[in-house]
Amino acid sequence: MLVRTAFAQGPPITADKPIMLGGKSFTIKTLTEIRTTERGTSTYVPVMMHYLPTSNSLVALHIPLVTYDLEGLSKETALADIILQGKYQFFRKDQTGKTFRMVAKTLQSLPTGKRIDLIGQSTKEYQGYYGLVAGYETLKYGISSELGYNWSPNADLDELRMKLGFGLPLLKPQYPNKQLNLYFEYTNSWLLDRDWYQLLYAQGVQYALKNITWEAAVQMPLVNDVVQGRKLEFSVFLGTRYTF
């Protein structure tokens, strides 16, 4: 029962989660972000391939396209920054109907995109992110948190990042898997060299049926201490994932 419970809520939408599926499993997913700022709109569409060599490790490749219509630039669709991801679960404590786990993760962003300063999408700068993810999940709710640092040696993109997410399942755990979940997710982002700070809130809903998941979220700034002309207005996330 614990295994089904641990995976019932599914991964958060804009945050992360330390709970992994069994070893030798493969997930193909996408999470499109339509981002609207004072500067214009970008649509970021990644194809993400995740593989778990073991039940406590993950490697992934994200190949994204971005379409942008930004002030001072011609509208265009182009390859964005390709991302390599690794995760390792180093702590796990399971009890009846609940589990607590911790994961170390890294994201390696390659400078394959255009130099248009779409942070997290297309910068044409190498970046390395290193973080810790912790999560606690029960039959009634789930909590996930993340603390990490994004290092960019050749650009002013160094960032301290903190995330906190709450998941609320609306259906009882069942097999075959069928779940409807609400997510409440917060992101703190400090761009240190630019002295920018954002506190973002995302409200999301997720529906899972067997090994397919659909999800959607709207993210808005609660604090938007960013230079005028670059402030986020809102983002819409639309995602699908298939595990086999």
Image: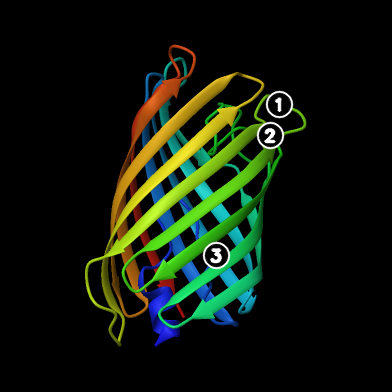
- Point out residue 100 in the picture as x, y percentages from the top left corner: 53, 69
Q: Is residue 51 above or below residue 226?
A: below
Q: Comparing marks 2 and 3, which lies closer to the viewer?
A: 3
- Point out residue 74 in the picture as x, y percentages from the top left corner: 44, 22
Task: Judge left or right: residue 122 versus residue 1.
Answer: right
Label 3 sits on residue: 18
Q: Residues within 10 Å of mark 3 (few under 14, many from 20)?
A: many
Kindly tell me whether residue 38 is visible in this rendering. yes
Residue at point 62%, 63% (across, down): 103
The residue under label 2 is which amino acid type?
Glu
State the separation of the CA atoms marked 1 and 2: 7 Å
- Point out residue 227 in the picture as x, y percentages from the top left corner: 49, 14
The residue under label 1 is which amino acid type?
Ala
Which residue is nearer to you in this view: 233 or 3? 3
Tell me the quarter of the image containing the N terminus.
Answer: bottom left
Label 1 sits on residue: 155
Label 2 sits on residue: 125
Counting residues from the start of the chain, the first of labels 2 and 3 encountered is 3
